[in-house]
Image (tube, helix red, strand yellow):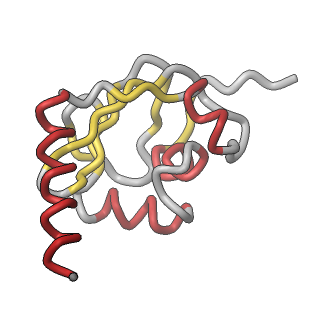
Amino acid sequence: MKIVVEMRIDKFIWCVRLAKTRSLGADLCNRNQIKINNYEQKPSKEVASGDIISVRATPIWRVYTVIDLPKSRVGAKLVKDYLKEITPEKDLMQLAELRRLNQQNRL
């Protein structure tokens, strides 16, 4: 049995369902919307357990801690075993308010 120690960031964000496809994950990296430990990274950058990943969700950065690395894409219920969200509550409230306003504007 092979133990996964490191994984490319584009593959990791696809495996934990932060991107619908691996190529979209790579595109996020290329557009500087993914950071590892507060540094913008290329899709080939390796991520390891304990790293902090930031994903741009305009107007905020959603922040996650890598708990473990999956062998392949995981089901939605298993994501919590590999990723823990540590985004400040203030930022999450700001994002929720923006989404609420956008929803009202569509009506």
Q: Considering the image in quadrants, where does the C terminus appear? A: bottom left
Q: Camera-side residue: 102 or 80?
A: 102
Left/right placement of residue 43 relative to residue 22 reads left
The residue at 51%/20% (across/down) is 67
The residue at 18%/49% (across/down) is 95
* Residue 87 image position (x, y, % from top left): 25, 31
* Residue 37 image position (x, y, % from top left): 26, 29
Q: Is residue 27 above or below residue 46?
A: below
Q: Is residue 74 above or below residue 51?
A: below
* Residue 83 image position (x, y, % from top left): 49, 29
Q: Is residue 7 above or below residue 22?
A: above
Q: Considering the image in quadrants, where does the N terminus appear? A: top right
Count of numbered badges drawn on the protein: 0
Left/right placement of residue 95 relative to residue 64 reads left
The residue at 41%/54% (across/down) is 43
Q: Is residue 88 above or below residue 76?
A: above
In which image quadrant can residue 30 be found?
bottom left
Left/right placement of residue 32 relative to residue 98 reads right
* Residue 66 image position (x, y, % from top left): 46, 25
In which image quadrant can residue 75 be found?
top right
The residue at 58%/35% (across/down) is 79
Q: Camera-side residue: 31 or 102?
A: 102
Q: Which residue sits furthest right?
A: 1
